[in-house]
Image: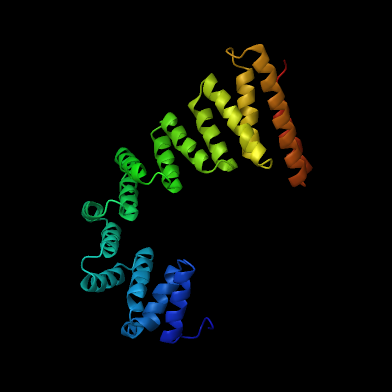
Amino acid sequence: MAKNQVASWTEARDQLRTWRENSDRKSREIVTLWDSVLMNKVDNLGNEKYLVLEQVCVAALDCYRLPLAEYCIKILMRDFPGSLRVHKYHAMHLEALEMYTEALEVLDSIVKRDETNAAPRKRKVAILKARGKTAEAIKELTDYLKMFMSDQEAWHELCDLYLQEQEYSKAAFCMEELILHNPHCHLIFQRYAEIKYSHGGFENMEIAKSYFAQAAKLNPNNIRALYGLLLTANNIASSPKCPASKKREAIKSSEWASAQIEKQYKMKSADDNSLKTVEGLLSQLQLDV
Protein backbone atom coordinates (compact mmCIF):
# COMPACT_ATOMS: atom_id res chain seq x y z
CA MET A 1 0.00 0.00 0.00
CA ALA A 2 1.50 3.34 -1.07
CA LYS A 3 1.96 6.01 1.60
CA ASN A 4 -0.43 8.47 -0.03
CA GLN A 5 -3.04 5.86 -0.93
CA VAL A 6 -6.11 5.56 1.30
CA ALA A 7 -6.48 1.96 2.44
CA SER A 8 -9.69 0.01 2.13
CA TRP A 9 -11.19 -1.19 5.38
CA THR A 10 -9.97 -4.75 4.69
CA GLU A 11 -6.43 -3.52 4.09
CA ALA A 12 -6.58 -1.46 7.27
CA ARG A 13 -7.90 -4.49 9.20
CA ASP A 14 -5.11 -6.70 7.85
CA GLN A 15 -2.49 -4.07 8.67
CA LEU A 16 -3.70 -3.78 12.28
CA ARG A 17 -3.74 -7.58 12.53
CA THR A 18 -0.12 -7.74 11.33
CA TRP A 19 0.96 -5.12 13.87
CA ARG A 20 -0.80 -7.03 16.66
CA GLU A 21 0.84 -10.31 15.68
CA ASN A 22 4.27 -8.65 15.54
CA SER A 23 3.66 -6.67 18.77
CA ASP A 24 4.36 -3.43 16.87
CA ARG A 25 3.15 -0.41 18.84
CA LYS A 26 2.66 1.97 15.92
CA SER A 27 0.32 4.29 17.77
CA ARG A 28 0.18 7.21 15.33
CA GLU A 29 -0.38 4.94 12.35
CA ILE A 30 -3.10 3.01 14.19
CA VAL A 31 -4.96 6.19 15.10
CA THR A 32 -4.62 7.47 11.53
CA LEU A 33 -6.07 4.25 10.09
CA TRP A 34 -8.93 4.45 12.57
CA ASP A 35 -9.76 8.05 11.70
CA SER A 36 -9.47 7.64 7.94
CA VAL A 37 -10.91 4.16 7.40
CA LEU A 38 -12.11 2.03 10.29
CA MET A 39 -14.14 4.43 12.41
CA ASN A 40 -17.25 3.97 10.28
CA LYS A 41 -16.52 0.32 9.43
CA VAL A 42 -15.94 -1.11 12.90
CA ASP A 43 -19.10 -3.24 12.79
CA ASN A 44 -17.80 -4.94 9.64
CA LEU A 45 -14.92 -6.46 11.61
CA GLY A 46 -17.03 -9.13 13.31
CA ASN A 47 -15.52 -10.54 16.50
CA GLU A 48 -12.19 -8.97 15.60
CA LYS A 49 -13.65 -5.55 16.31
CA TYR A 50 -12.94 -5.93 20.04
CA LEU A 51 -9.27 -6.66 19.41
CA VAL A 52 -9.15 -3.59 17.18
CA LEU A 53 -10.88 -1.46 19.81
CA GLU A 54 -8.29 -2.54 22.39
CA GLN A 55 -5.50 -1.77 19.95
CA VAL A 56 -6.95 1.65 19.10
CA CYS A 57 -7.55 2.40 22.79
CA VAL A 58 -3.89 1.88 23.71
CA ALA A 59 -2.76 3.84 20.65
CA ALA A 60 -5.11 6.70 21.54
CA LEU A 61 -3.70 6.84 25.08
CA ASP A 62 -0.17 6.89 23.65
CA CYS A 63 -1.13 9.82 21.39
CA TYR A 64 -3.16 11.56 24.13
CA ARG A 65 -6.34 11.20 22.10
CA LEU A 66 -8.35 10.79 25.28
CA PRO A 67 -11.86 11.17 23.78
CA LEU A 68 -11.05 8.36 21.33
CA ALA A 69 -9.73 6.17 24.15
CA GLU A 70 -12.89 6.85 26.16
CA TYR A 71 -15.04 5.93 23.15
CA CYS A 72 -13.30 2.56 22.80
CA ILE A 73 -13.52 1.87 26.54
CA LYS A 74 -17.25 2.62 26.64
CA ILE A 75 -17.95 0.10 23.89
CA LEU A 76 -15.76 -2.53 25.55
CA MET A 77 -17.34 -1.95 28.98
CA ARG A 78 -20.82 -2.13 27.48
CA ASP A 79 -20.15 -5.49 25.84
CA PHE A 80 -17.85 -6.89 28.58
CA PRO A 81 -19.00 -5.22 31.81
CA GLY A 82 -17.15 -7.62 34.12
CA SER A 83 -13.88 -7.83 32.21
CA LEU A 84 -10.80 -7.10 34.32
CA ARG A 85 -8.91 -6.41 31.10
CA VAL A 86 -11.32 -3.62 30.19
CA HIS A 87 -11.17 -2.21 33.73
CA LYS A 88 -7.39 -2.00 33.30
CA TYR A 89 -7.89 0.23 30.24
CA HIS A 90 -10.32 2.31 32.29
CA ALA A 91 -7.61 2.78 34.94
CA MET A 92 -5.09 3.75 32.26
CA HIS A 93 -7.55 6.36 30.96
CA LEU A 94 -8.01 7.79 34.46
CA GLU A 95 -4.26 7.88 34.84
CA ALA A 96 -3.94 9.84 31.58
CA LEU A 97 -6.51 12.29 32.94
CA GLU A 98 -4.28 12.63 36.07
CA MET A 99 -7.07 11.21 38.22
CA TYR A 100 -4.55 9.10 40.10
CA THR A 101 -6.64 8.36 43.18
CA GLU A 102 -9.50 7.04 41.06
CA ALA A 103 -7.07 5.04 38.90
CA LEU A 104 -5.56 3.40 41.99
CA GLU A 105 -9.03 2.52 43.27
CA VAL A 106 -9.86 0.77 39.99
CA LEU A 107 -6.54 -1.09 40.05
CA ASP A 108 -7.09 -2.14 43.67
CA SER A 109 -10.49 -3.53 42.75
CA ILE A 110 -8.91 -5.59 39.94
CA VAL A 111 -6.24 -6.99 42.29
CA LYS A 112 -8.88 -7.91 44.89
CA ARG A 113 -10.75 -9.92 42.27
CA ASP A 114 -7.60 -11.57 40.88
CA GLU A 115 -4.44 -11.49 42.99
CA THR A 116 -2.46 -13.24 40.24
CA ASN A 117 -3.10 -10.44 37.73
CA ALA A 118 0.32 -8.86 37.27
CA ALA A 119 -0.59 -5.94 35.00
CA PRO A 120 -2.62 -3.83 37.49
CA ARG A 121 0.03 -4.33 40.17
CA LYS A 122 2.66 -2.98 37.79
CA ARG A 123 0.47 -0.02 36.89
CA LYS A 124 0.10 0.80 40.59
CA VAL A 125 3.88 0.89 40.91
CA ALA A 126 4.15 3.13 37.85
CA ILE A 127 1.58 5.59 39.25
CA LEU A 128 3.22 5.73 42.68
CA LYS A 129 6.64 6.22 41.09
CA ALA A 130 5.34 9.00 38.80
CA ARG A 131 3.88 10.80 41.83
CA GLY A 132 7.19 10.64 43.67
CA LYS A 133 5.93 8.20 46.29
CA THR A 134 9.04 6.05 46.18
CA ALA A 135 8.54 4.35 49.56
CA GLU A 136 5.00 3.27 48.63
CA ALA A 137 6.18 2.11 45.21
CA ILE A 138 8.87 0.00 46.87
CA LYS A 139 6.32 -1.62 49.20
CA GLU A 140 3.97 -2.36 46.31
CA LEU A 141 6.77 -3.81 44.21
CA THR A 142 8.13 -5.99 47.03
CA ASP A 143 4.62 -7.37 47.56
CA TYR A 144 4.41 -8.04 43.83
CA LEU A 145 7.75 -9.89 43.81
CA LYS A 146 6.63 -12.16 46.63
CA MET A 147 4.17 -13.59 44.13
CA PHE A 148 6.13 -13.11 40.88
CA MET A 149 9.72 -13.82 41.92
CA SER A 150 10.88 -14.63 38.39
CA ASP A 151 9.95 -11.22 36.96
CA GLN A 152 13.38 -9.85 36.07
CA GLU A 153 12.11 -6.45 34.95
CA ALA A 154 10.53 -5.99 38.38
CA TRP A 155 13.84 -6.77 40.11
CA HIS A 156 15.56 -4.16 37.93
CA GLU A 157 12.86 -1.63 38.78
CA LEU A 158 13.08 -2.37 42.51
CA CYS A 159 16.85 -1.95 42.34
CA ASP A 160 16.41 1.50 40.74
CA LEU A 161 13.94 2.52 43.45
CA TYR A 162 16.29 1.41 46.23
CA LEU A 163 19.13 3.36 44.60
CA GLN A 164 16.95 6.48 44.61
CA GLU A 165 16.65 6.01 48.37
CA GLN A 166 20.42 5.27 48.61
CA GLU A 167 19.69 1.86 50.10
CA TYR A 168 22.67 0.19 48.49
CA SER A 169 22.48 -3.12 50.38
CA LYS A 170 18.89 -3.71 49.27
CA ALA A 171 19.70 -2.64 45.72
CA ALA A 172 22.59 -5.12 45.72
CA PHE A 173 20.22 -7.87 46.88
CA CYS A 174 18.03 -7.21 43.83
CA MET A 175 21.04 -7.59 41.55
CA GLU A 176 22.01 -10.83 43.32
CA GLU A 177 18.59 -12.21 42.42
CA LEU A 178 19.16 -11.19 38.81
CA ILE A 179 22.59 -12.84 38.76
CA LEU A 180 20.88 -16.10 39.72
CA HIS A 181 18.58 -15.70 36.71
CA ASN A 182 21.36 -14.54 34.35
CA PRO A 183 24.70 -16.00 35.45
CA HIS A 184 26.32 -15.17 32.09
CA CYS A 185 25.14 -11.54 31.68
CA HIS A 186 28.14 -9.22 32.01
CA LEU A 187 25.96 -6.12 32.41
CA ILE A 188 24.32 -7.46 35.57
CA PHE A 189 27.72 -8.31 37.10
CA GLN A 190 28.92 -4.85 36.15
CA ARG A 191 25.95 -3.12 37.74
CA TYR A 192 26.23 -5.16 40.93
CA ALA A 193 29.90 -4.13 41.13
CA GLU A 194 28.97 -0.47 40.60
CA ILE A 195 26.47 -0.62 43.46
CA LYS A 196 29.08 -2.14 45.78
CA TYR A 197 31.60 0.50 44.65
CA SER A 198 29.09 3.29 45.38
CA HIS A 199 28.32 1.80 48.80
CA GLY A 200 31.98 2.15 49.71
CA GLY A 201 34.12 0.54 52.36
CA PHE A 202 37.06 -1.85 51.98
CA GLU A 203 34.96 -5.06 51.97
CA ASN A 204 32.50 -3.70 49.40
CA MET A 205 35.42 -2.52 47.28
CA GLU A 206 36.86 -6.05 47.26
CA ILE A 207 33.49 -7.45 46.20
CA ALA A 208 33.20 -4.78 43.51
CA LYS A 209 36.65 -5.68 42.19
CA SER A 210 35.70 -9.36 41.89
CA TYR A 211 32.48 -8.62 40.04
CA PHE A 212 34.06 -6.04 37.72
CA ALA A 213 36.63 -8.73 36.90
CA GLN A 214 33.89 -11.27 36.20
CA ALA A 215 32.06 -8.79 33.95
CA ALA A 216 35.30 -8.19 32.03
CA LYS A 217 35.83 -11.95 31.78
CA LEU A 218 32.34 -12.49 30.37
CA ASN A 219 32.79 -9.63 27.91
CA PRO A 220 36.41 -8.52 27.33
CA ASN A 221 35.11 -5.52 25.34
CA ASN A 222 33.23 -4.08 28.31
CA ILE A 223 35.19 -0.84 28.79
CA ARG A 224 33.05 0.24 31.73
CA ALA A 225 33.84 -2.98 33.61
CA LEU A 226 37.57 -2.54 32.84
CA TYR A 227 37.52 1.01 34.17
CA GLY A 228 35.64 -0.21 37.23
CA LEU A 229 38.26 -2.91 37.81
CA LEU A 230 41.02 -0.33 37.45
CA LEU A 231 39.43 2.09 39.93
CA THR A 232 38.55 -0.56 42.52
CA ALA A 233 42.01 -2.12 42.32
CA ASN A 234 43.64 1.27 42.84
CA ASN A 235 41.25 2.03 45.69
CA ILE A 236 42.08 -1.26 47.42
CA ALA A 237 45.84 -0.89 46.93
CA SER A 238 45.83 2.61 48.41
CA SER A 239 43.69 1.64 51.42
CA PRO A 240 45.46 1.50 54.82
CA LYS A 241 43.44 -1.66 55.57
CA CYS A 242 44.97 -3.51 52.62
CA PRO A 243 47.63 -6.12 53.55
CA ALA A 244 50.76 -6.36 51.43
CA SER A 245 49.68 -9.56 49.65
CA LYS A 246 46.36 -8.07 48.56
CA LYS A 247 48.07 -4.84 47.55
CA ARG A 248 50.34 -6.72 45.12
CA GLU A 249 47.33 -8.56 43.71
CA ALA A 250 45.40 -5.30 43.34
CA ILE A 251 48.32 -3.65 41.53
CA LYS A 252 48.50 -6.57 39.12
CA SER A 253 44.77 -6.23 38.45
CA SER A 254 45.19 -2.49 37.93
CA GLU A 255 48.03 -2.98 35.46
CA TRP A 256 46.08 -5.65 33.57
CA ALA A 257 42.94 -3.49 33.37
CA SER A 258 45.01 -0.50 32.21
CA ALA A 259 46.63 -2.60 29.47
CA GLN A 260 43.23 -3.91 28.32
CA ILE A 261 41.78 -0.40 28.17
CA GLU A 262 44.72 0.83 26.08
CA LYS A 263 44.30 -2.19 23.82
CA GLN A 264 40.62 -1.43 23.30
CA TYR A 265 41.32 2.19 22.41
CA LYS A 266 44.07 1.18 20.00
CA MET A 267 41.64 -1.15 18.25
CA LYS A 268 38.77 1.31 18.06
CA SER A 269 40.36 4.76 17.92
CA ALA A 270 41.84 6.14 14.73
CA ASP A 271 42.64 9.44 16.46
CA ASP A 272 46.18 9.28 17.88
CA ASN A 273 45.59 12.39 20.02
CA SER A 274 42.66 10.83 21.87
CA LEU A 275 44.68 7.65 22.42
CA LYS A 276 47.57 9.65 23.88
CA THR A 277 45.13 11.43 26.18
CA VAL A 278 43.79 8.09 27.45
CA GLU A 279 47.29 6.73 27.94
CA GLY A 280 48.24 9.87 29.87
CA LEU A 281 45.22 9.56 32.16
CA LEU A 282 45.91 5.87 32.78
CA SER A 283 49.53 6.58 33.63
CA GLN A 284 48.36 8.92 36.38
CA LEU A 285 46.48 6.00 37.96
CA GLN A 286 49.47 3.63 38.10
CA LEU A 287 50.55 2.39 41.53
CA ASP A 288 53.92 1.18 42.78
CA VAL A 289 54.44 -1.68 45.19
Q: State the quadrant of the C terminus.
A: top right
Q: Residue 166 is drawn in which quadrant?
A: top left
Answer whether residue 77 is visible to the viewer in this image. yes
Q: Residue at x 76, y 38 (%)?
A: 263
The percent position of residue 217, horizontal first and vertical second, equals: 66, 37
Report which quarter residue 256 is drawn in. top right
Residue 89 location (% of width, % of height): 29, 63
Q: How is the image coloured?
A: rainbow
Q: Residue at coordinates 31% horizontally, 39% vertically from top-left?
A: 139
Above or below for 20 versus 125: below
For the point 66% across and 22% down, which residue is it?
250
In percent of the image, x 43 and y 85: which residue is there?
10
In this rendering, position of residue 180 left or right of residue 209 = left
Instruction: Please identify the quarter of the rendering in which residue 253 is found.
Output: top right
Left or right: where 106 falls relative to 161: left
At which x and y percent is residue 169? Answer: 43, 29
Residue in the foreground of this view, choosing between 150 and 286 = 150
Number of numbered discs = 0
In the displayed structure, 178 sits above or below 14; it is: above
**Of 150 and 86, the residue lying toward us:** 150
Q: Is residue 175 above or below residue 286?
A: below
From the top left corner, tell me how far across and down residue 211 is, in percent: 58, 32
Judged left or right of residue 258, residue 74 is left
Left/right placement of residue 100 relative to residue 3 reads: left
* Residue 284 makes an appearance in the image: no
